[in-house]
Amino acid sequence: MDGAGRLARSLRSPRPQTDLKAAAIGAGMLLREWLASKRVVTGPSLEREPPHRLIAMIERYIPRRAGIAATVLILLGSTGFGVVKGGHLEELTSALSDTRNAIANSVGFRITTVAINGRKQLTQDEVLATGGVNGRSSLLFLDAATVRDKLKANPWIADATVLKFYPGQLQIDIVERTAFALWQQDGRLSVIADDGAVLEPYVSRRFLSLPLVVGKGAETRARDFLALLARYPQVNSVTKAVIFVGERRWNLRLKDGLDIRLPENDVGNALASLSRLDKEEKLFSRDIVAVDMRLPDRLTVQLSDEAAKAREELFKDKKSKKKAGDA
């Protein structure tokens, strides 16, 4: 107590208390101005409340140092908003991850041995880069499930298993897809697997020997059709491309440019007939441009322009000779 018998205040309390009063006065004035601008009926209790009573209520119900806590929260919120708005969230996350991994590596959880099994098309560096594993990664904080999901997102990888052996060994087992065919759609050429997955754009000549399939939907239906075509080597050996028409049936484009229009149903019998006709009649060596097998009871052959002209002249000669004989 002081000499006048009054309780002495702490020497450290006036500044926060003064700041709190000033904040309360400002808040009260702003509240009144906002209510007035909105024309809100506040009721007799709030309209008639004296300013000092309002300040007293705020001091009573707001905890001490609330202003400091609010300021800290505002600063943290502003910093977070600036990081997100400025597009630096990924950089911040990466920096925090690198720091965490560096600490783990320093205490003995550095990845020192990596074993990758099952790879054929992909290199070890490609597998690690796909899984997000690099020289800064630590085994302690490496999420095996996340690495596996990243690996399976690569179209070349059908499945993957990621195992961690502490303190520093990582094992990755992958099941690769195999390049099955080249698929042409809308002028784009891609390498596909037998399940129709697009593996990569066609840029490497090492895939040049793969069969060519063309058309929408051909990538998912090619496996079954090419397996059926392989049963008839007489036809398969001279086929350059298979074309899926209207997502219903197939055409064959032979290496010499001959088009063969197969029926929608009973394709096996059509291929067997083609094979037999070529063996017996040398069908593929004739001067024709198309063979239409879509009708079940007949086979239609379209001659080339030269063959059609020669055939027409032949009929004219026969007709003129017949007239001469009749005369």
Image (cartoon, rainbow, N blue to C red):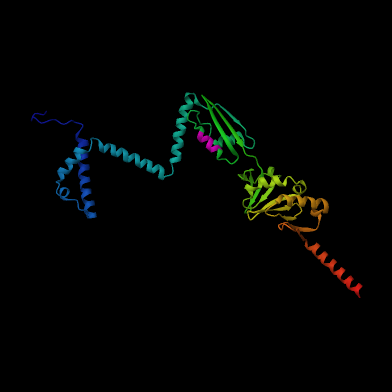
Which residue is at the far bottom? 327
Q: Is residue 16 left or right of residue 91?
A: left
Q: What stretch of residues is rendered in magenta?
A: 145-151
* Depth order, front residue of 51/253: 253
Q: Is residue 214 left or right of residue 30?
A: right
Question: How far from the left and from the top, in percent, is residue 226?
Answer: 69, 46
Q: Is residue 252 left or right of residue 44?
A: right
Can residue 146 be found in the magenta stretch? Answer: yes
Decide: is 174 above or below 32.
Answer: above
Predominant SS of the magenta segment: helix
Q: Quadrant of the N terminus?
A: top left
Question: How far from the left and from the top, in percent, is residue 71?
Answer: 29, 39
Q: Residue at x 20, y 41 (%)?
A: 58
Q: Quadrant of the C terminus?
A: bottom right
Decide: is 128 above or below 294.
Answer: above
* Depth order, front residue of 7/286: 286
* Depth order, front residue of 130/20: 130
Can residue 99 be found in the magenta stretch? Answer: no
Q: Residue at x 80, y 64 (%)?
A: 308
Question: How far from the left and from the top, in percent, is residue 94?
Answer: 46, 36
- Which quadrant would residue 263 be assigned to in this image? bottom right
* Depth order, front residue of 47/327: 327
Which residue is at the far left? 4
Q: Is residue 121 left or right of residue 12?
A: right
Question: How far from the left and from the top, in percent, is residue 285?
Answer: 81, 54
